[in-house]
Image (spheres, rainbow, N blue to C red):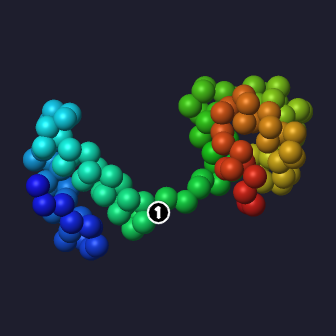
Amino acid sequence: MKITPIRNDKDYQNALNRLEDIFDAKKGTDDGDELEILSILIDRYENETFPIGMPDPIEAIKFRMEQMGMKQKDLAEVVGFKSRVSEILSKKRKLTLGMIRKLNTTLHIPTEVLVQDY
């Protein structure tokens, strides 16, 4: 087992190929240890090379509503009036701290997503 840092695309591809070869390795074996270490290195390289930004707060709300099968009238029970929901979803009204707290609790959207500018 010779593990080296992943510094470029070639190293990354080699690590992915090796990971595929030992994917079913048993925990506690040499291959299992190599699998665990390679997974950590690949994850680190991907996070540094292909960062994923946080979603737009309103898009996150719409996505979560879709996942939960919610309609605008359902969201009105969380943030207030139906007209307020429409204004929020069309980005004409900003989320208040109270709304953010309720959305976090009800829809389980992280506050870090909801407090962003949009």
Secondary structure under tag 1 reads loop
Q: Residue at x 33, y 52 (%)?
A: 40
Q: Residue at x 28, y 73 (%)?
A: 7
Q: Nearer the viewer, residue 96 or 8?
A: 8
Q: Nearer the viewer, residue 97 or 76?
A: 97
85 on left or right of 27: right
Residue 62, visible in the rendered structure: no
> Residue 28: horizontal and vertical position, in percent?
19, 35
Q: Residue at x 47, y 63 (%)?
A: 51
Location of residue 115 with respect to 46 vertically, above or below = above
Question: In which image quadrant can residue 106 be found?
Answer: top right
Residue 111, visible in the rendered structure: yes
Identify the image quadrant of the N terminus: bottom left
Identify the image quadrant of the C terminus: bottom right
Q: Which residue is mark 1?
A: 51
Q: Nearer the viewer, residue 31 or 78?
A: 31
